[in-house]
Amino acid sequence: MYMGKVRIGMVNFINTAPIYEVWKSRHHPENWHIVEAPPSTLNKMLANRELDLGFVSSYEYAARPEKYRILSDLSISANGSVGSVFLFSRLAPEKLNKRKVLLSGQSETSISLVKILLEEFIHVYPRYEVGNASGEKADCADAVLAIGDEALRLSGGNEFPYKLDLAEVWCRYTELPFVFAVCAVREDFCSRHPKTVEAIHRELLSCKDEGRIQLESICKAVAHRIPMHPDECYVYLRAIEYGLGARNRKALETYFHYLIARNDASNKSFPLTLFES
């Protein structure tokens, strides 16, 4: 077993709680080091060899598929409404052509997804800017993309009359779930230390299974972060899928197809390279 530091990326949004809260309650080898950050930060760290494995945006795998393997049966996905990835708009979506849309910089996957939905499905072509969904730029925007805990907070307000749950819109048009994040390991680390990767993979799968069982108590422990009622938290987290079954893999491949067609992916075609324990 590898004795050096293993750097594991964990998204610091509440949507990882069913895995991460269980993880934090268990004893692990001292060299397993967790790094908490938003998806976009974890993407850069994994690409720059500052992480060895962890949860990253699906877009990150598409950008550099030759560098990674995806740990099987782990993801952050939604088969319908996800409740935490929204386009909040002051106008009906079909009226956003040439209007200003502010994009959260926290997730490349959500940025590319909102562009696919607006341009490919609704056929409007806004002017995009990147900025904080709660900052001054948001006050001047016609629509705002917000993700994670920020989206959960904004969804309860009345500032934006139109609230598009991006996963729900994707499912409506494709009849597939949407995979927002995968757990990826660097190919070079995996090749050198497969036993360590296997051990971490098994532990993450075990945490995922236990998290489903303990979901009510987990919600009571984390709901205050938003803040939201534990019952609302339960409904929200219950709707998220953490596996990567056949339909999720097909959904991931469909998303990659759109990226390739739009020249948003580095390769013109690539398979899903899975790590199986």
Image (spheres, rainbow, N blue to C red):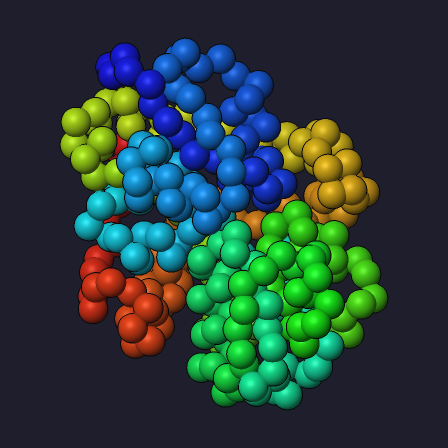
Q: Is residue 190 left or right of residue 254?
A: left
- Nearest to the observer: residue 42 or residue 73: 42
Q: In the rendered view, would you say 198 is above or below 174? A: above
Q: Residue at x 70, y 57 (%)?
A: 134
**Residue at the image position 70 percent from the left and 61 percent from the top:** 136
Q: Residue at x 60, y 77 (%)?
A: 100
Q: Going by the image, does 27 lie left or right of 276?
A: right
Q: Position of residue 104 (x, y in %)?
A: 56, 59
Report the number of discs.
0
Q: Quadrant of the C terminus?
A: top left
State left or right for residue 141 relative to residue 229: left
For residue 134, say whether it is visible: yes
The residue sitting at the left extreme is: 191
Find residue 243 and report its image quarter: top left
Above or below, comparing residue 22 to residue 229 in the picture: above
Whether residue 74 is visible to the viewer of this picture, yes or no, is no
Residue 103 coordinates in the image, percent (x, y): 56, 64
Position of 21 compared to 219: left or right?
left
Camera-side residue of 129 and 203: 129
Return the x and y of residue 168 as percentages of the image width and height.
58, 67
Furthest residue toward front: 136
Give the residue drawn at x 64%, y 30%.
Answer: 214
| Residue 74 image offset from top left, x and y in percent | 41, 42
- Residue placed most toward the observer, 201 or 46: 46
Q: Quadrant of the N terminus?
A: top left
**In the image, residue 91 above or below residue 88:** below
